[in-house]
Each structure stands twice: as C-alpha cells, then as structure tokens.
Amino acid sequence: MISSAQALSTRRSRTLPYTTPRLSPRLIIVAGSICFLLLIVAVVTHLGTYSVTPARFVARADVQSIGIAKLQTTVATSQLRPTTINASKALKRIDQTSVDQYANQQEYNSWWPSACSTASMTAVFNSYGHNYRITDILKVESGIGAITPNQGLLDPEGIDQTASKFGFNTQNLNNPTLDQMVTIANSGKPVIISFPPPVLGGHWEGGHLLIALGGTTINGVKYVHLADSSRLNMQYMAVGDSTTPRTFLYYWQGFAKILTPSVPAKPPARSTSSSNASYSVIGKPTVSADFINRVFASYNSPAARKGQALYDLGVQYGIDPAFALAFFLHESSFGTAGEATKTLSLGNLRCYDGATCVDQDRGGYAAYSSWEEGFQAWYELIRNYYIAQRGLTTVDMIIPVYAPTADHNDEAAYIASLKHALDTWHSGQVAVQ
C-alpha cells in the first residue's frame, strides 16, 4: 500500500511568489455555498491525492505519509506584529462530519454537508482558547441568515458578521500572493481560504472552505499546511502551480480571511507533553487499560474492549503500551483500514518463519487468529529484535529500521506522527487530530 503522500513527494513546486487572479469575493465565497453537495464525487476524485492523517494509510514497510511534520518556515515573518498566542499551532481540526459537533441527529442530518464555513470558524475561535462546537456557531450563522442547509454560506460577509458576534474581528486580504498568505499563517494567525468550484472558474467540485496554517518544505518539496473539516482531512498539499492539477495553487484563487479576537486572548494552558522526552518504548505504562478502550471506542476499532490485553502485554514485555497504541493508530487506524482488517496485526508485520502468511503477491503479511495474538507478536518483535538484538529503544532509532525510506516510507513523518499521538494521549485527550 502506498499513501497519497508518495504521489505528492514526486512533485516539485514552482517559483514563489505566485500572484493569484482577481475574482469577486461574492463569487469566490459561493465555493463554500455547497461545500460538500458533491462530497462523494470529491472523495472519489481527490482522495489519494493529498497527504492526510498518517493513520489513514496502511502498511509498515511501504507507507510514505507526510503526517505531522516540523514546519520549516519558508518565508520571513519579521514584518508582522506578533500575536499573544500562536493560534496556527494551537488550532485543532473540527470535523464537520462528526455528529458530536451538532446539537442532535436532526441538526447533523440537515447541516453537515454545508457546514465547512461553520467548522472553519469554530476551529479558529477555539485556537484562541475557546471550546465551541459547530452547533454553537451554527445557531448564530444561520440565525442571521448567513447560511442555509442547501446553499451553505450565502455571502463572504456572513463570516465577518458571525465572527463579530463571538468577539472576533475579520481582516479580508485582497488577493494576496501565496507568500503573503503563508507568512501570515506561519506568524500564528490561521487563514480561512476557499477552493472555488468549476462553475466559478475553479477546480474543486462543489467548492470548499478550509484553513491554511502555514507552509513547510519536506524533502525539497513545498507544501501548504491545512486544517480541513471534510472527510478528506487534508493536512499537507503540494504548492504546485495554477496549471498543475491536485496542487494548492491549482485550487486556491486568492480568497483569504483572518479572524482575530477583539480583545487579545490569553495563551491557553500548556498541555502536558510526553513524560518520556526521549520517547523510549521501554518503561511502565503511561496510559491505563480503560483509556486504551476509550481510544478504541472513539475510532470504532474492531479491537474494542481489548485494552486490557494490550496493557497487560506491555507490562509483560516491559514496553509502555502507549507506544503500541501509537503504532496501531499509524498503521491501520486501530484495525479499521488496510491489511490489518484481515490479518489482525497491530504493526502490519511482514511474513516470517512460523507465521501464517497472506497476500504473498504484495510482499506477504503475517496473519493472526486474534487481536491478542497480533498484539503479542508486535511486542515480541520490539523487545526481542529491536531492543535485545539491535539496541534500538526510541522511536527515532526504531523507525528507520521498522519503516525505512528504502521501502518508500517517510521516516521523519512516521516518527513525528507517533510522537504527536503520544503527546495527545499524555495530555488526556482521546482523539488525535
């Protein structure tokens, strides 16, 4: 299995800056009017084209995923006035397709296809220390007549008017260059952007509103870091140019809004980072069996209620089960995708002597009779081979052997995604964004 990121990594971005064509804001915003009216078409058309959450794509030895990577800022920010907090880094994605974001099932059924503008505002507001759900913003946005279930956002000023009700000011950028937009996002201010639909001269079926969080360069390729509320959950998109399909500049045509609090926000409380700064897999459990079960349940994992087994095996092998949990997420979204759905393998292990092997035409994968057996095989591999034989004890040391670049993997992204998941769980949060 090769993730969408592999296709991305082969593209080279064109020279920056790129000046976007001028379009009427009222036309551009219609891109969000039916942001997911054609969602199914968009998924079929675009999924597999962008780098999304690493856990969506599976195979230990042949996944390349951009995932969560350290931003390497490509533009200077010295001319921007600093914000009190870095909202771009603090921003957590809001999922417009999650029923938990709505007041009830009826509201969800009515609004989820057209709520990309609402989800974008919700995420930005929360990045400044609030704790809103889509339903909270939707009540105001729909109450002032700025959005309808069938047409979505009716006018760009609907965002401005809604934001003002929550104590936020709106700065509308006038067809900024890519460099200008990325510089602002990298400085700590998320930027709401639009991908207009073909009927308005764009290329995104149905149109879409999402958030730019900054820019980064990975393996020499420039990307825009995104927060996307749709099912695609795009995180990094290659910059490209206006003529290269499936790249940022092919879709974005200059629409950009910055929402900031009218009264400067106080920095949010720092989350508790991993108690193990070196990210060594060796050690006592840092998560409970009950917490593991909550994580499995939140992802609808077929390994539901197997948290005690994962925990006990970690204790038995002297490995913190939080690391097993992180590998399980990255490899198969806890058994919900890829080979693991039939092999019951936590780490998508390749065939080895004594194992039942399947899919030999794809390199061969070890298959197990139960999730518990799959858990144990992973623990044994890490303890007996990586630790005992190779002396590799941290994720930084293990991944270059476990998922090497030579097998079309992005080692840095894999490592970063594991650390991000661990930090999320050690802060008490269940869902990894």
Image (tube, rainbow, N blue to C red):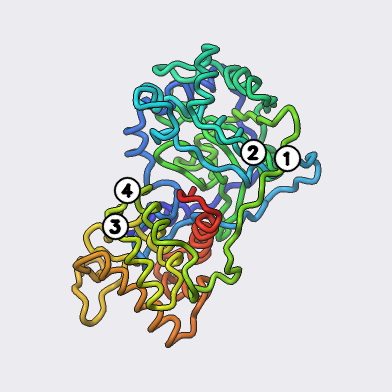
* Mark 2 touches mark 1? (CB < 8 Å): yes
Closer to the N terminus: mark 3 or mark 1? 1
Q: Residues within 10 Å of mark 3 (few under 14, many from 20)?
A: many
In the rendered view, tell whether residue 150 sits above or below residue 392: above
Q: Residue at x 65, y 44 (%)?
A: 16
Closer to the N terminus: mark 2 or mark 1? 2
Closer to the N terminus: mark 1 or mark 4? 1
Give x and y (percent) for residue 198: 43, 26
The residue indicated by pointer 1 is 266
Give x and y (percent) for residue 185: 66, 41
The residue indicated by pointer 2 is 129
Q: Residue at x 46, y 62 (%)?
A: 287
Closer to the N terminus: mark 2 or mark 3? 2
* Mark 1 touches mark 4? (CB < 8 Å): no
Residue 380 relative to residue 171: left or right: left
Q: Secondary structure at mark 1?
A: loop
The residue indicated by pointer 3 is 303
Residue 166 relative to residue 399: left or right: right
Q: Secondary structure at mark 4?
A: loop
Residue at the far top in the pictured view: 145
Residue 10 relative to residue 124: left or right: left
The residue indicated by pointer 4 is 300
